[in-house]
Image: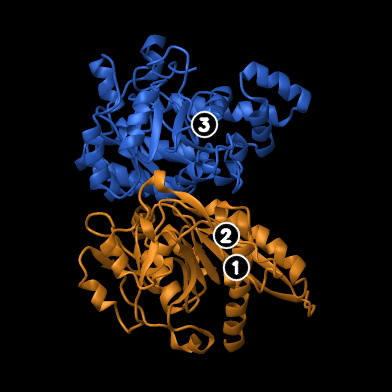
Amino acid sequence: MGSISEAPDVTVGVLALQGAFSEHLQLLRQAEQVLAVTTPVPRRKWVFLEVRTEAELALCDALVIPGGESTAISLVAERSNMLDPLRDFVKQARKPTWGTCAGLILLAESANRTKKGGQELIGGLDVRVNRNHFGRQTESFQANLDLDFLKKSDGGSNAPFRAIFIRAPVVERLLPHMPGVQEGEAETEETVIAPSRSTDQSFISTIQGAEVEVMAILPGRTATLSKEAKEKLDSEAGDIVAVRQANVFGTSFHPELTGDPRIHTWWLEQVVDAVEKRRALA
Amino acid sequence: MINDLPAVMASELPATNGNSASNNNGESNFTVKTGLARMLKGGVIMDVVNAEQARIAEEAGAVAVMALERVPADIRANGGVARMSDPKMIRDIMATVTIPVMAKARIGHFVECQILEAIGVDYIDESEVLTPADHAHHVEKHSFSVPFVCGCRNLGEALRRISEGAAMIRTKGEAGTGDVVEAVRHMRTVNADIARARNMDDAELRVYAKDLQAPYELLKETAKLGRLPVVNFAAGGVATPADAALMMQLGCDGVFVGSGIFKSGDAAKRAKAIVQAVTHFKDPKILAAVSEDLGEAMVGINCMSMEPEQKMQGRGW
C-alpha cells in the first residue's frame, strides 16, 4: 500500500453480449502473467471483467470486442441500450478498444455485405470492411502472419503469428479521416456507416495517430477475389487484416483462439501507455 | 439468488482446447471447425423452414439458423420418414441471410452430409430429429471440411461423437415438445457424469471410460477441464426465455430453439426475447422484462405422458 512499486489498477472489459468473450479473458490473464515477468516493477493490478451493461462499461479503462456474429452482437447491443454508450466510449472518449473479427466489423466506420436492411455499427476506425470476405465456413483457414509491431516486445524472436480466420472480414479500403460521418461511403450502394461522434478535446493531446495505420497484411490471398474487387483494393500486397487508429485496434483474425498471448500482451502495453497519459492529464 | 447458482456451472472452455480430438489431418482444421462453434457461444440458433423465417430469425439476433423442411413438432405430427431438406430450399436460405446456415442430415447418412458440404452449409447437424439411416454407425466426421454438431444424452454419447469428429455438441432434449424437462435431464446427466470423472484417478478413469464406452483420452481431458472439451448447446424443448436462461445457468454455452419460436403466437417477439435472455441469463430483472407479453407459447406435449417409442432422443447410440 502506497509503495512506489505499485501502479494504479487498470480495468479491461470484454464485451460479453455474445461470442468468444471467455477466450479473450483467458488470453488477457495469460498476458498479465507475461507482463508480470517482463515488467515486474511497478506491479500493476489488472481487473478483467465481462461487460453486458452500461454500468459495467463505465468501470472500464479499455475494452475488447470479441468475435461472434456481428449482426447478433449489434442487435443485442441495441436492445440492451449499449450502442450509444459504446460509441461514446470508443469515439468520444477514445479509450483503448480492440475488436477481433465481428469486433473489427463493429469498429469500422463503414461495412458492406451486411444483412438486408443493414446493421448498426459503433465505428472508430476510418475503414470499410467486407464481411465474410473469404466465403463460408468451409473457406475458413489458418495462416502465418509476420507482425512487425510484435517484434519490439517479443525479445526479437520474430516467430510468425498463427492467425485463425473464421468467416473472416477484411479491410477493403482505408478512408480519409473527416469530421462527421463518412459521407462518400453513405452514397455507396449496400454499404452501412456508423453515426459520428466528435472526440472529447480534453484528452486529444494524449491520442496519437489521426489516420489509419495498416498493422498486418495477409499475403497472397487476393487470388480469391473477383477481378473487379481486386481493382478496388488500395493495397496490391494482399488483404489488410489488422489496422489501428487513435487508440482503436482491429484484427480480422482470432488471437484469442491460439493460446499465443503475444498480441494480447502488446495490446495491454498500449493500454497502459494510453491510460497513464490520460491519468497524468486528469 | 444468483449466488445460489447450481454447483454444476461449467468452467470456461480453454482457448486452444479440442486439438486432442483431431485426427491430425493435414492442417489442424479442427481448430477452425471448433472455432466457429466458439463464435456462436452465448447465442441462439433457430430452426427455420424457409427464407422468410430465416430473415425473422436474423432480425431477432440469431447467431445461426438451422434450415429444415419441417420443424420437429410437424415431423412428430406428420410421421413418416424425415430426411435431409431439399438443397434448393437450403440454398434459398443461404442466399437470404448473412449469418451461418446449418442443416440436418440423418444419423449415419454420409451421402446427405456430402451433399450438404457441396452446397456449402456452415455446419451439419447429424440429428436424431430425422429418421436414422444406419442402425449402428454414425458418420465419420473428421474427413469432412464442414464441421458437425451432434446430440447427446450423457457424457459417453458426447465423447463418442467428439471422437468421430463432432466439433460441437448439443444436449438432445426432446425435440418438438416444447417441454424443457428432457433438455434439463440431459444437461444434468452430462454434468453429473463429468463431476464423477473429476474425482477419479487414472486407473478409475480407464474403468469409467469402458463403462461409458468413451475414449479414455477424451474422458481424461474432460475430467481435467470439468466440462465437455467442445462447445455445448442445449436443445430439444426450449420454448420460453426462462427455459433458455435455465439451460444457460445449468452451464450450456448457447441454445438451439426449434419449434418453440415458429409454433408460437408472435414468433419475432419471442425470438428476440429468447436472444436477450441468453445474453442476460444471470439477470432475473431483465429476464422478467423480456418475458412480458409474448403471446401464446407453443402448445407442447408433456414428455412425461409420452411412450418411449414416441421419443426421438433414443435414436443414435
Of B228 and A138, nearer the camera is A138
**To which residue does mark 1 refer?**
A11
Of B100 and A7, nearer the camera is B100
Q: Nearer the viewer, mark 1 or mark 3?
A: 3
Q: Secondary structure at mark 1?
A: strand
Indicate the position of residue B21 as horizontal and vertical percent values: 59, 34
B151 left or right, relative to B206: left
Q: Residue at x 77, y 78 (%)?
A: A2
Amino acid bearing label 2: Leu
Indicate the position of residue A51 as horizontal and vertical percent values: 50, 59
Q: Quadrant of the N terminus of chain B?
A: top right
Looking at the rendered structure, whether the residues under marks 1 and 2 are on a common chain is answered as yes
Q: Which chain: blue? A: B
Q: Residues within 10 Å of mark 1 (few under 14, many from 20)?
A: some
Looking at the rendered structure, whether the residues under marks 1 and 3 are on a common chain is answered as no
Does residue B195 appear in the picture of this structure? no
Indicate the position of residue B52 as horizontal and vertical percent values: 19, 42
Q: Residues within 10 Å of mark 3 (few under 14, many from 20)?
A: many
Q: Residue at x 41, y 55 (%)?
A: A168
Q: Which chain: orange? A: A
Tell me which label, 1 or 2, sits earlier in the chain: 1
Does residue B135 appear in the picture of this structure? yes
Indicate the position of residue A101 as horizontal and vertical percent values: 44, 58
- Which chain does the numbered disc 3 sit on? B
Q: Residue at x 77, y 66 (%)?
A: A37
Q: Distance of mark 1 from mark 2, alpha carbons?
A: 8 Å
**To which residue does mark 2 refer?**
A49
Q: Secondary structure at mark 2?
A: strand
Amino acid bearing label 1: Thr
Badge number at residue B165 = 3
| Marks 1 & 2, CB-CB < 8 Å contact | yes
Amino acid bearing label 3: Gly
